[in-house]
Image: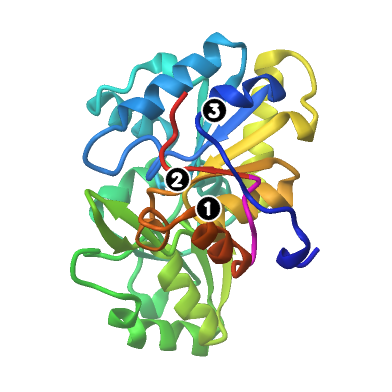
Amino acid sequence: MPPSEIAATRPLPGFSDIADRFDLCLCDVWGVVHNGVAAFQGAVEALVAMRERGITVVLVTNAPRPCSVIGEQLASFDVPASAWDEIVTSGDVCRALIRERAGRPMFRLGPERDLPLVAGLDAPEVAPEAAEYVLCTGLRDDETDTAETYAGLLDGFAARGLEMICANPDLVVERGGRIVPCAGSVALAYEERGGKVVYAGKPHRPIYEAALAIAEEKRGAPIARDRICAIGDAIRTDIAGADAFGATGIMVLAGIHAQDLMEASWDQRHGWFRRQSHRPVYALPHLVW
């Protein structure tokens, strides 16, 4: 259905207004629970309250790292384990994709902090000219690099028809009030050169299916799609993914689209939503109870 035919996004004072409608919350992490520097206390309190109401909370993030690493990061921000039931990352999905290519030489593009993603896997890391596929976890230095920094590499990979696994489909993310590029921006530049990309995270279905399977096992029963909400701050990943999966999309405005939305009136926000490829069912400035 074209966005113009979808009902207008409804302002939401707090999640408690709709809590009784859901059994499962799939919640984004970066931009909703924290900004890469500190946690949002209101969001943490809302997640704890959801679980106290009997809602299963699965944190679903495009972080290109295993879920255990994200748990450690949340703990460093003083986010209590009572704020979630499970964590599913694009890194978890990505590791499965790498296992399918066991033994094949790989070129890894990304920062050293993403090395836990390939730990223990049969993924020999080689020079660009020897690679049979590419793993992109991000930019080597997301403070200074852009996708075009790697133009020569990408041109060479595309000319050889190499497949790229993108471990984080996000184009950008907020870090302490700044917007920095992610692996998705490199993957998009590669597709524009005719390269083939396999995406591990949101908005693609595998990460949602993994999260739902974990939640259903935890609850011991199937969960209807109309009893699932997905909270996030990005139209392209969080809201598009929720829509495709049949979940109720809830958008946090104070994330990567804050410049367009936080100082706008609701009339202006509705106009902005109408111009997007996907539209959330609900929106609120920050996740609060």
Among the two numbered marks 3 and 1 on one chain, the one whose residue lies closer to the N terminus: 3
Q: Is 278 positioned to the left or the right of 220 in the image? A: left
**Which residues are drawn in magenta?**
277-281
Residue beneath label 2, please? 121
Direction left: furthest residue: 144
Among the two numbered marks 2 and 1 on one chain, the one whose residue lies closer to the N terminus: 1
Question: Residue 9: horizontal and vertical position, in percent?
Answer: 63, 50
Residue at position x 53%, y 65% from top? Answer: 272
Task: Answer few, some or many: residues within 10 Å of disc 2's Cα (few below 14, many 20 plus, some between 14 and 19).
Answer: some
Residue beneath label 3, please? 15
Amino acid type, residue under disc 3 in the picture:
Phe
- State yes or no: residue 125 in magenta: no
Distance between the alpha carbons at the discs numbered 2 and 3: 40 Å
Is disc 2 in contact with disc 1, using a CB cutoff of under 8 Å? yes
Question: Residue 255: horizontal and vertical position, in percent?
Answer: 38, 50
Q: Is residue 201 visible?
A: no
Is disc 3 in contact with disc 1, using a CB cutoff of under 8 Å? no
Closer-to-camera residue (133/56): 56
